[in-house]
Image (tube, rainbow, N blue to C red):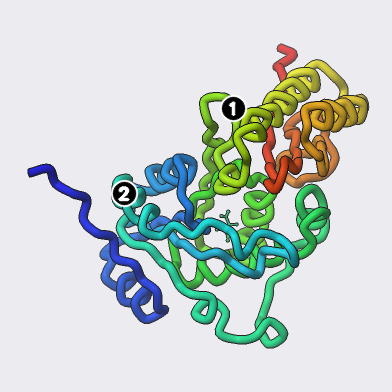
């Protein structure tokens, strides 16, 4: 008889999580998610598996959605997610409800505030408070799970930079690993929000990555002082393809400051129908030697 992967324990109270945590003989690796898992998430779990037990969290965090955003309609697919996690060797799932994660009303809670220079540019300029919500939930998740390693995707690159800084500033004893964006065959970055695309929008969507790729390529040959013209041409090209671009920006990959010609990335967000797509591509400098 074919063997089925064993059911993964789904922990939904802090006591259950603590009991599981105390049962682990060694360190624990962690993949935080909001569920509706795709191959990008599973790659993070596969990376986390191996020398340590792996726990993934599934929690659609209301604090990182703004008014009028997609909190209510964000896809919740726990049964499918558990099957997918079992197939890649995940050992447990932390799936608290909102009252467990946030027992107190917003005005009574402690919170962490990421620095404006990191959190109010790029996506933060268009989603005010979004990264406050991300930091607050990830801070809680880190102390609840106490992982030795946490794994994030580069698709949410700004989130990654902000969380790395949070870990450094607060000396949180966790190592953050980042994995490259996993893409569909046509280049579209995998995202739970891709399911909001209609068939015709889905055909347009890979254009975002193509435009960023072309801009990154062009930027490799240029001085950062000339990136503004590239940036504007990127906005125009996205617009011509049928996107409503929010921003296209070159930034330093480490601190999200102005590009310096050494370690830059190009970032973009664009609306397509009811979906908001984001992507980013490295502008790797060619060696002069
Ligand atoms: O990247 C995500 O899915 C979320 O922002 C995270 C890190 C799970 C926090 O809710």
Q: Is residue 234 above or below residue 40?
A: above
Where residue 9 appears, as percent x and y from the top left, is 29, 65
* Residue 113 position (above or below residue 46): below
| Residue 164, quarter of the rendered image | bottom right
Q: Which residue is mark 1?
A: 187
Q: Residue, x 85% and y 32% (percent of image)?
A: 235
- The quadrant of the picture occupied by the N terminus is top left
Q: Is residue 188 visible?
A: yes
Q: Quadrant of ligand 1?
A: bottom right
Image quarter where the C terminus lies is top right
Find out if the beta carbon at label 2 lies less than 8 Å from the nearest ligand 1 atom. no
Residue 172 image offset from top left, x and y in percent: 56, 65
Q: Single out the residue that lies furthest toward the front.
A: 199
Q: Give the crowd class for mark 2: few <14, some 14-19, many >=20 residues within 10 Å.
A: few
* Towards the viewer: 241 or 172: 241
Q: Quadrant of residue 241?
A: top right
Task: Give the mark toward the camera: 1 or 2.
Answer: 1
Q: Is residue 98 shown left or right of residue 91?
A: right
Q: Is residue 255 left or right of residue 17?
A: right
Residue 203: x %, y % from top left: 63, 28
Q: Find the distance from the CA under tag 1 to the CA under tag 2.
A: 32 Å
Residue named by callout 2 = 51
Residue at x-position 73% and y-position 64%: 66
* Label 1 or label 2, whichever comes before in sequence order: 2
- Disc 1 crowd rating (10 Å Cα; few below 14, some 14-19, many 20+) is some
Q: Callout 2: helix, strand or loop?
A: loop
The image quadrant of residue 205 is top right
Query: Is residue 224 or residue 71 the one in the foreground?
Result: 71
Q: Is residue 152 above or below residue 74?
A: above
């Amino acid at each position: 008889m074919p063997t089925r992967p064993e059911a993964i324990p789904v922990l939904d109270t802090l006591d259950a999580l603590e009991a599981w945590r105390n049962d682990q003989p060694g360190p624990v690796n962690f993949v935080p998610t909001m569920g509706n898992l795709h191959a990008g998430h599973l790659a993070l779990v596969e990376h986390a598996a191996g020398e340590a037990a792996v726990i993934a969290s599934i929690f659609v965090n209301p604090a990182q959605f703004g008014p009028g955003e997609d909190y209510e309609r964000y896809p919740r697919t726990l049964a499918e997610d558990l099957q997918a996690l079992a197939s890649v060797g995940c050992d447990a799932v932390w799936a608290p409800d909102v009252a467990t994660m946030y027992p107190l009303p917003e005005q009574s809670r402690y919170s962490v505030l990421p620095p404006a220079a990191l959190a109010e540019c790029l996506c933060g300029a268009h989603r005010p408070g979004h990264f406050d919500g991300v930091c607050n939930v990830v801070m809680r998740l880190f102390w609840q799970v106490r992982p030795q390693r946490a794994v994030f995707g580069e698709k949410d690159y700004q989130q990654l930079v902000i969380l790395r800084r949070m870990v450094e500033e607060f000396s949180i004893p966790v190592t953050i690993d980042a994995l490259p964006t996993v893409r569909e065959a046509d280049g579209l970055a995998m995202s739970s929000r891709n399911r909001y695309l209609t068939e015709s929008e889905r055909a347009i969507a890979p254009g975002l990555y193509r435009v960023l790729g072309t801009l990154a390529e062009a930027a490799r040959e240029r001085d950062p002082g000339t990136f503004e013209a590239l940036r504007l041409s990127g906005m125009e090209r996205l617009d011509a393809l049928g996107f409503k671009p929010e921003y296209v920006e070159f930034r330093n990959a480490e601190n999200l400051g102005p590009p310096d010609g050494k370690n830059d990335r190009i970032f973009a967000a664009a609306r397509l129908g009811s979906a908001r797509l984001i992507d980013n591509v490295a502008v790797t400098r060619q060696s002069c030697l």
